[in-house]
Image: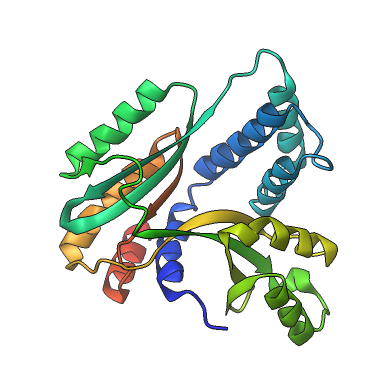
Amino acid sequence: MAGHSKWANIKHRKGAQDKKRAKIFTRILKEIHIAVKETGDSSPETNPKLRLAVQNAKGANIPKDTIERAIHKASGADSGNYENVTYEGYLPHGVAVFIEASTDNIQRTVANVRSIFNKSGGSLGTNGSLEFIFDRKGIFTLSRKQLGEKNREQLELQLIEAGAEELEKTDDLWIITTAFEDFGPFQNKLEELGIEARSSQPERIPNSTVTLKLEEAQKTVQALDRFEEDDDVQNVFHNLEMTDELEAALQAEDN
């Protein structure tokens, strides 16, 4: 099974952004909060959404006591309520951006998102305007070390039968893509097999990408970074092609 090259290229940059550990912690702890508030169930054993959030927290090496405090806080009557919202728009040169946010103040969030679009020379669009560009998929990251001594060929066949569409293998990971509707069943299959994914979440995968000149691409990445840095923003999806030249320039900046 071939890896999803377009997703892998885009996620490579997302991985660089994810070095900002404080932002990761905030995002995942908010997922825990939402999972508890939406259902009123603070038990990962009986709350699948919470179980998934806790699993992602462990994969990000968030301490156990921090996870437990987040669950306890969300269970309190005086804890805040968050609403999930999405925004769609374009940055210059036709780069599409899809933003997922969780907020307790929609007016603040939409004002911040619109401001970043405007200052970057782009524009905030209407919901649904990018449906033809992004496909929803389930993305599961498995640690090869965590797979242990399992029969890898047999396991691969079981995962394909469970809904794996694509499987990308690196030295350390298996990155698996499923159809969005197979996300839950595939998660259940992993639990049945005794496999705990390092991370698992729905992603929005572009079905086409935009390749820009280096200077234009760097300015686009700067705008994407500003979206990522907003406290209300959970995920930023885009269709900028991560060329080798751009990747090298970004790595030089990070170093």
Q: Is residue 104 above or below residue 53?
A: above
Q: Residue at x 73, y 31 (%)?
A: 71
Give the image quarter of residue 67.
top right
Residue 153 seen anywhere in this rendered image of the structure: yes
Quadrant showing the N terminus: bottom right
Q: Residue at x 20, y 66 (%)?
A: 212
**Residue projecting furthest to the top:** 78
Number of callouts in the render?
A: 0
Looking at this view, is 155 or 161 the one in front?
A: 161
Quadrant showing the C terminus: bottom left
- Looking at the image, residue 219 sits to the left or right of residue 208; the answer is left
Image location of residue 49, percent across then percent down: 69, 43
Give the image quarter of residue 11.
bottom left
Image location of residue 182, percent across then percent down: 64, 61
Image location of residue 227, percent across then percent down: 35, 42
Residue 62 seen anywhere in this rendered image of the structure: no
Looking at this view, is 120 or 183 the one in front?
A: 183
Q: Residue at x 44, y 21 (%)?
A: 105
Looking at this view, is 233 or 179 the one in front?
A: 179
Give the image quarter of residue 9.
bottom left
Image location of residue 224, percent across then percent down: 32, 49
Q: Is residue 104 above or below residue 159?
A: above
